[in-house]
């Protein structure tokens, strides 16, 4: 019986070997795959945008999920371990339903639209925050090169214009280890990229960064958790930060002429345990030219910022910042002017202070609770001397929301917000200080593609 069982096993093994040999003979008779010609690459498509996920653009609160989007990877040959060029396409469609309890403030919570009109409750629906982005990452013989082009439909103010708006058009080059050169349109180097909570409202709270994207050239050094960056940026004087005395708010002085760019510097440290710290500064020059009318004069404006994110046992995150400057202008959200030209042609910079604090509670893996508060204060005596209608003296805001993400491609948010604003009401003869507060409720749905 033992001899019979061994014979059966040998017969089965022989049959398996014969089948394996037949399969080998079949593979040998198939034609070989032709070798790739010079200049021909392998192109692959895959779901997700992980290829550029580690290159954070914009605020962390606005990040698009890495599992969304599409990645196109190009590899010169199958022998290379990784693609040398990757392009990701991502974005989202966002629909908003807004109810204003006091007055219509537009498609986003516009603080300068708070003028004390009462009993003007208003319903508004729009999809202007819908966003589209293309990013790339290329490994070259002279270092990695990255690009981003992103836009949305929030051009032309807060009331209905749906023209496409360019947010970023930016390129970076790692020309030597730890050093990066960048140029184009990008977030101002003065901005803190990690401060703030995610809000359903596009604007968020005052006290944070105002002018968040500028045209610039930047040099960055990064080592470990430390980052230091210096940038030369587009001046903002003749874009609205400098106004005429007795002129309407946001109207540029007629003979304003930018002659020196803005300079910004930022130091950031990502500490162990999920904590983050930042110090940044900005300097800008205001200038008028007699060749354009009036007289020539110059004044220097400046601003500083300190910010921190504190991880509270991985359950919550405390995010806070303080911003102060003389002539800081629209870098501070909630501030309406940076400087004004008096009747004698002299430029006067205006002081401003911004405070912000927020808490992010991670209720579950898919649900978060966000609470935030902001305050912006302008020097009252300087605002009165400027005599510009609708100029903010101080403004306070608060946002509270619940965000739920049932799947990675969908996020839903319910939010209530409040603001109280004190401003100058000037009719060309009399100047009065007025105060008004407003409430708004908003629902938003992000559909990531």
Image (cartoon, helix red, strand yellow):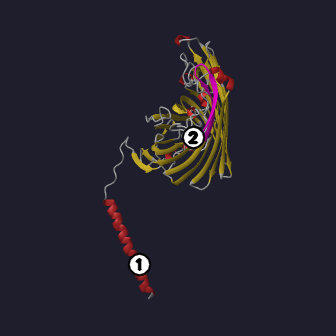
> x, y percentage for residue 384?
65, 22
> x, y percentage for residue 39?
38, 40
Q: Nearer the viewer, mark 1 or mark 2?
A: 2
Q: Which residues lie in the magenta part?
A: 418-438
Q: Is the residue 28 above or below the residue 65 in the image?
A: below
Q: Residue at (33%, 60%) from the top-left corner?
A: 28
The residue to which callout 2 is attached is 59
Task: Evaluate whether residue 276 shows in this view.
Answer: no
**Under tag 2, what secondary structure?**
loop
Badge 1 crowding class, 10 Å Cα cut-off, few under 14, some 14 to 19, many 20 or more, is few
351 lies left or right of 17? right
Residue 28 drawn in magenta: no
Residue 437 drawn in magenta: yes
- Compare residues 54 and 212 and report the one nearer the observer: 212
- Compare residues 125 and 271 and report the one nearer the observer: 125
> x, y percentage for residue 393?
65, 29
Q: Which mark is residue 10?
A: 1
Q: Is the residue 364 above or below the residue 274 in the image?
A: below
Q: Residue at (59%, 32%) from the top-left corner?
A: 189
Q: Quadrant of residue 222?
A: top right
* Placement of the N terminus among the 4 image quadrants: bottom left
Dominant secondary structure (helix, strand or loop) of the stretch shown in magenta: strand
Q: Is the residue 51 above or below the residue 154 in the image?
A: below
Distance, label 1 to label 2, CA atoms, is: 68 Å
Q: Residue furthest front?
A: 119
């Amino acid at each position: 019986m033992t001899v019979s069982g061994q014979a059966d096993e040998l017969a089965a093994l022989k049959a398996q070997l014969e089948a394996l040999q037949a399969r080998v003979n079949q593979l040998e008779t198939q034609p070989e795959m032709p070798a790739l010609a010079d200049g021909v690459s392998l192109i692959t498509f895959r779901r997700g945008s992980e290829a550029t996920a580690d290159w954070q653009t914009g605020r962390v609160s606005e990040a698009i999920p890495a599992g969304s989007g599409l990645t196109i990877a190009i590899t010169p040959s199958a022998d290379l371990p990784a693609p040398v060029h990757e392009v990701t396409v991502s974005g989202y469609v966002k629909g908003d339903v807004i109810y204003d309890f006091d007055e219509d403030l537009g498609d986003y919570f516009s603080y300068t639209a708070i003028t004390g009109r009462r009993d003007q409750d208003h319903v508004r629906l729009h999809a202007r925050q819908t966003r589209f982005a293309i990013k790339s990452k290329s490994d070259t013989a002279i270092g990695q090169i990255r690009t981003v082009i992103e836009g949305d439909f929030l051009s032309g103010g807060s009331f209905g214009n749906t023209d496409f708006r360019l947010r970023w058009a930016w390129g970076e080059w790692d020309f030597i280890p730890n050093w990066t050169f960048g140029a184009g349109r990008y977030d101002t180097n003065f901005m803190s990229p990690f401060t703030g909570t995610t809000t359903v409202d596009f604007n968020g709270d005052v006290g944070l960064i105002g002018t968040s994207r500028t045209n610039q050239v930047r040099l960055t050094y990064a080592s470990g958790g430390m980052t230091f960056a210096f940038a030369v940026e587009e001046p903002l004087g003749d874009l609205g930060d400098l106004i005429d005395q007795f002129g309407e708010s946001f109207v540029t002085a007629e003979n304003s002429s930018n002659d020196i760019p803005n300079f910004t510097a930022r130091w950031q440290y990502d500490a162990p345990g999920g904590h983050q710290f930042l110090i940044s500064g900005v300097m800008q020059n205001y200038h008028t030219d007699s060749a354009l009318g009036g007289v020539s004069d110059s004044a220097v404006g400046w601003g500083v910022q300190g910010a921190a994110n504190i991880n509270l046992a991985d359950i919550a995150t405390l995010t806070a910042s303080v911003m102060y400057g003389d002539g800081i202008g629209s870098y501070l959200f909630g501030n309406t002017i940076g400087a004004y030209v008096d009747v004698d042609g002299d430029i006067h910079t205006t002081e401003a202070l911004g405070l912000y604090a927020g808490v992010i509670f991670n209720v579950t893996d898919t649900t978060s609770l966000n609470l935030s508060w902001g305050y912006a204060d302008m020097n009252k005596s300087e605002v009165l001397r400027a005599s510009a209608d609708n100029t903010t003296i101080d403004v306070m805001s608060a946002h509270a929301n619940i965000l739920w993400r049932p799947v990675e491609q969908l996020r839903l948010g319910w939010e209530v917000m409040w603001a109280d604003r004190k401003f100058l009401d000037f009719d060309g003869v009399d100047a009065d200080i007025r105060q008004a507060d407003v409430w708004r409720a908003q629902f938003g749905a992000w559909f990531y593609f």
